[in-house]
């Protein structure tokens, strides 16, 4: 059977767009695919110029989650929740609670087809609030029965993939010999910067929030503007903020040799992967690099593995990336194309199995 579920352009199984009854805010829950199992993906609370932009983002992010789960070898599909805040709108505690309950009700209405988790603009405590309306919320704090903050586990996966990338691109996995520009010092980016500093790497860092500068100082990273970070002359650029960074406009300005980071949807469109390739920049697909959080959370919460077992699985994404980079090199294709082919293959194989035989 030919699976088209993982084509980013393919139609989603189910999309709910609702004005929250309590908050009045636009809420989108996009379920891209349940071909492999329950769809999972975080709940993003962010400002958008228009709610339609939030809808577009949710659709793209949910589709990427299907590929991410397939490549991580998880028995899950992709979904995403987006709460689209109008420009300049901040949430006080009451409004936040209201909108999380609204989102929780939408998720509850999907009867387990989709489970959410933390994402840009939400954290473990928000999952507790969502869980007041639906049990389908990952990463509640450990004391509240969840697996806790996933950002440290995502960062562990990023470090593992950075080593694999350096081994492929520079012939050695030793991070102390390399320079990195970390763009975005949020929950995951902050961890990645500290871990790179511990590994002895040479660092440049940036964030739109000046308040995060002390993080860079502590890590011994040179603090630069986000623009200078993007175009820094380093071995590896690590995008750890919002997506859409690489475009036909920005790619010619880059001076890094390779890119790997946890930001979702780093390319404006899939063809930008070809452009990076033409510029001789090795791009590790974000859907592979950023999978540590979902791998850890599902291992602990769904499959009842110990944290140590889950962490071992997170390290496994380094091997996945190595395979993808080698396949790309051997076939003269881009890592993005190799990753997509691998994700499809995974689903095709799975669909040949009866449900009870699936992993
Ligand atoms: N931000 C994570 C992601 O979308 C959200 C998540 C974490 C979802 C853990 C489920 C479990 O990849």
Image (tube, rainbow, N blue to C red):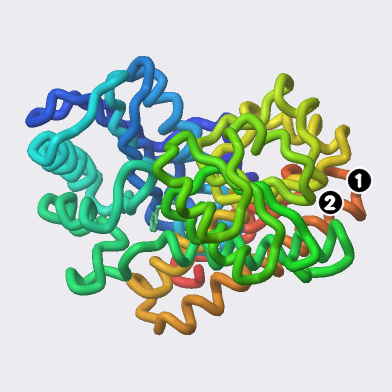
The answer to which image quadrant residue 278 occupies is top right
Q: Which residue is mark 2?
A: 328
Which residue is more in the foreground, 118 or 345?
118
Numbered badge on residue 49: none
Q: On screen, 271 above or below 113?
A: above
Q: On screen, 114 above or below 135?
A: above
| Image coordinates for residue 23, horizontal then vertical, percent | 12, 29
Position of residue 109 in the picture relative to residue 262 (left or right): left
Q: Tell me whether the residue at label 2 lies in contact with that at label 1, contact meaning CB atoms closer than 8 angstroms.
A: yes
Q: Which residue is mark 1?
A: 332
Mark 2 near ligand 1 (CB under 8 Å)? no
Name the residue: 58% across, 30% down.
244
Mark 1 near ligand 1 (CB under 8 Å)? no
Mark 1 neighbour density, 10 Å: few (under 14) some (14–19) many (20 or more): few
The alpha-carbon separation of the residues under discs 2 and 1 comes to 6 Å
Callout 2 secondary element: helix
Mark 2 neighbour density, 10 Å: few (under 14) some (14–19) many (20 or more): some
Which residue is more in the foreground, 24 or 34?
24
Position of residue 194 in the picture relative to residue 117 (left or right): right
Q: On screen, 145 above or below 241?
A: below
The answer to which image quadrant residue 38 occupies is bottom left
Name the residue: 38% across, 16% down.
49
Position of residue 244 in the picture relative to residue 31 (left or right): right
Position of residue 323 in the picture relative to residue 266 (left or right): right
| Image coordinates for residue 356, horizontal then vertical, percent | 44, 71
Which residue is more in the foreground, 292 or 110?
292
| Image coordinates for residue 154, horizontal then vertical, percent | 50, 61
* Residue 49 in view in this figure: yes
Name the residue: 15% across, 52% down.
129
């Amino acid at each position: 059977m030919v699976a088209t579920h993982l084509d980013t352009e393919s139609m989603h199984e189910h999309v709910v767009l609702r004005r929250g009854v309590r908050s009045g805010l636009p809420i989108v829950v996009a379920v891209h695919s349940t071909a492999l199992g329950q769809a999972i993906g975080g709940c993003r609370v962010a400002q958008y110029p228009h709610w339609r932009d939030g809808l577009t983002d949710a659709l793209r992010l949910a589709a990427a989650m299907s590929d991410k789960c397939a490549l991580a070898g998880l028995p899950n599909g992709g979904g995403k929740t987006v709460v689209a805040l109008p420009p300049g709108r901040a949430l006080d505690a009451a409004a936040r609670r209201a909108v999380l309950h609204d989102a929780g009700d939408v998720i509850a209405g999907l009867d387990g087809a989709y489970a959410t988790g933390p994402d840009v603009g939400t954290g473990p405590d928000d999952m507790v609030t969502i869980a007041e309306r639906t049990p389908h919320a990952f990463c509640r704090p450990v004391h509240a029965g969840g697996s806790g903050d996933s950002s440290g586990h995502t960062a562990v996966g990023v470090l593992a993939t950075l080593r694999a990338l350096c081994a492929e691109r520079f012939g050695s996995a030793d991070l102390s010999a390399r320079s990195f520009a970390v763009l975005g010092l949020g929950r995951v980016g902050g961890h990645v910067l500290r871990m790179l500093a511990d590994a002895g790497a040479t660092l440049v860092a940036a964030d739109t929030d000046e308040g995060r500068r002390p993080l860079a100082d502590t890590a011994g990273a040179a603090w630069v503007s986000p623009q200078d970070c993007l175009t820094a002359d380093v071995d590896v650029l690590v995008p750890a903020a919002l997506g859409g960074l690489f475009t036909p406009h920005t790619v010619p300005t880059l001076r890094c040799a390779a890119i790997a980071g946890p930001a979702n949807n780093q390319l404006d469109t899939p063809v930008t992967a070809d452009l990076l390739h033409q510029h001789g920049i090795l791009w590790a697909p974000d859907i592979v690099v950023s999978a540590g959080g979902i791998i850890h959370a599902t291992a602990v919460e769904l499959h009842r593995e110990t944290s140590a077992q889950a962490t071992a699985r997170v390290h496994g994404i380094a091997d996945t990336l190595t395979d993808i980079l080698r396949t790309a090199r051997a076939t003269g294709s881009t890592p993005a194309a190799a990753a997509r082919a691998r994700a499809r293959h995974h689903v095709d194989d799975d669909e040949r199995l009866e449900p009870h035989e699936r992993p």
